[in-house]
Amino acid sequence: MTVVALMGATTLFAQTDVVATFQQGLANAKAANYTEAIAQFQEVVDASWDIEEPDANQLKAIAGSKKFIVTCYNKLGVAAINAKQYEDAVAAFTEAANAAELFEDISAMNKNRTLIGQVYEVQGADAFNSGDYATAIAVFSKGYEADPRNTGMALNLAESYFKSDMYQNGMTICTNISQLNADKFAEAIAEAQAKMAMYTNNEVAKLQMANDYDGIIAMAAELADAALAQKITLQAYYAKKEFAKMVELSEAAIAAQTTDEGRSDIYYLLGVAYNEMEQFDKAIAAMKSVTAGANVENAKAVIAALTVE
């Protein structure tokens, strides 16, 4: 009898009190009593499962409660940021994002995940600026997981990896950035690509100092950026004086390039390989395809020298 009575009481509440409880939640939310408001809104949502045919007012209360649960958690997060209580801010925004996902509000979910990323970005800034890259990685990586489109933070995460001799990790982040929408993220993509080129050159230089050209080829095989990987590979085979291998790989290397400068760099290496193999007509043909980038004048000089001969 007691169990039946309790069930009856729950059903009675669901049918008669959800609107009143919703109104109480609104009052608490308006007074910035967000924790109390969340509890009341959640009570409405929980009770809604027992209402078989909610009327218009009940439907409004249920829908409103779902919306304001997300809003109140968001407000708690903002208050925590203002108080520089970053862990509390992340916890609140995470609750907001999870609730929004549960209630199928994708816009609110994405908004709060973006805020999580921004909190971690602020939190990790001091460590990054002071050169404490281990701490910066620990913080920024959490923010990157929440919002990989926060390119400012992502670039700082990549830089932290590079500065910590975690080359492949940095390259992975930069490659992900370079694959974002080019119209929206053009500046970040350009910076990511510049980092990739610079730190790759640094890695190549270290291996060159050790005459470890096979190490360079192995490193290139791990790169996600096919254009850069192919260029480095050809340069390594040139250092090994394996010119026939350069010719063999050149077609795929040219196809992997995405810019005129990239294609010209490969044609220049191909021309150099043919020249070393004393296949001068093919060397000239390759050099004539060098139309952009830093090797244009060098290519012209090679063509002139071979033509005179």
Image: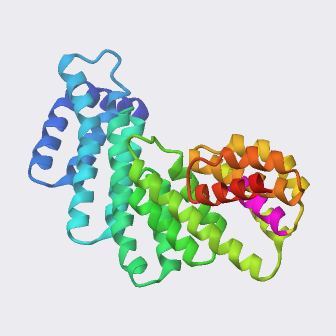
Image vertical order of residue 32 relative to residue 51, above or below: below
- Left or right: residue 51 versus residue 244 is left
**Residue 71 belongs to magenta span:** no
Camera-side residue: 189 or 105?
189
Image vertical order of residue 161 relative to residue 43, above or below: below
Question: Residue at 42% across / 37% down in the picture?
Answer: 102
Work out which quarter of the rendered image holds the N terminus and state it.
Answer: top left
Work out which quarter of the rendered image holds the C terminus and state it.
Answer: bottom right
Image vertical order of residue 26 relative to residue 10, above or below: below
The part of the chain drawn in magenta is 228-239
**Residue 229 belongs to magenta span:** yes
Residue 21 appears in view: yes
Q: Which colour assignment does the render follow?
A: rainbow
Question: Residue at 40% across / 72% down in the picture?
Answer: 124
Quarter of the figure with residue 233: bottom right
Question: Residue at 22% across / 53% down in the picture?
Answer: 75
Q: Residue furthest front?
A: 308
How many marks the image carries: the answer is 0
Q: Position of residue 25 (x, y in %)?
A: 17, 43
Q: Position of residue 62 (x, y in %)?
A: 26, 29
Question: Residue at 13% across / 37% down in the picture?
Answer: 23
Q: Give the overall secondary structure of the magenta segment.
A: helix
Q: Position of residue 152 (x, y in %)?
A: 39, 60
- Left or right: residue 238 versus residue 123 is right
Q: Position of residue 134 (x, y in %)?
A: 53, 79
